[in-house]
Amino acid sequence: MTREEFEELVAEALDRIPSELTRLMDNVAVFVEDEPPAGDSELLGLYEGTPLTDRGEWYAGVLPDRITIYRGPTLRMCASREDVVAETEVTVVHEIAHHFGIDDARLHALGYG
């Protein structure tokens, strides 16, 4: 799967997030990278920033939070295009949930682990 096709899958996954939630997202950008940082070869996505639940009066003038979805590990773990589509959607939802302050334990319980 080409980088462009994968980026389109990420965009489609973002489009499926209910508008009621996307309207609440604040100061966050989503990126696609081919590979995660060295040493994390199986990492599918990463949220870097300050969750909405942790922001206070001090939160002003900061760079956007960053959600990165990694193409290489996703393609390596999936056997078919359908698997890539499903895994990409789960990963996008998982990382957006971190933006809303939902931790890994809760995401695993909800099936987005």
Image: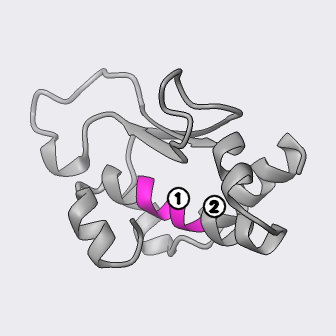
Res. 88 mark: 2
Residue hosting label 1: 91
The quarter holding residue 109 reads: bottom left
Residue 90 located within the stretch drawn in magenta: yes
In the rendered image, residue 27, in percent from the top left (x then y), is placed at 40, 38
Please give left or right for residue 17 compared with residue 75 in the image: left
Which residue is rendered at x = 32% and y = 33% of the image? 49
In the rendered image, residue 102, in percent from the top left (x then y), is placed at 24, 60
In depth, the one of 39 and 11 nearer the eye is 39
Badge 1 density bin: few <14, some 14–19, many ≥20, Cα 10 Å: many
Magenta stretch, overall SS: helix
The quarter of the picture where the C terminus appears is: bottom left
Q: Amino acid at mark 1?
A: Thr
Answer above or below: position of 87 versus 65. Answer: below
In the rendered image, residue 83, in percent from the top left (x then y), is placed at 72, 71
Res. 64 mark: none
Which residue is rendered at x = 66% and y = 52% of the image? 74
Q: Which residues are magenta?
A: 89-95
In the rendered image, residue 73, in percent from the top left (x then y), is placed at 64, 45
Answer above or below: position of 55 versus 77. Answer: above
Badge 2 density bin: few <14, some 14–19, many ≥20, Cα 10 Å: many
In depth, the one of 25 and 42 nearer the eye is 42
Report helix, strand or loop for mark 1.
helix
Please give left or right for residue 37 compared with residue 50 in the image: right
Distance from disc 1 to disc 2, alpha carbons, whole Å, reads 5 Å
The quarter holding residue 71 reads: top right
Residue 72 located within the stretch drawn in magenta: no
Mark 1 vs 2: CB contact within 8 A: yes
Report helix, strand or loop for mark 2.
helix
Q: Amino acid at mark 2?
A: Thr
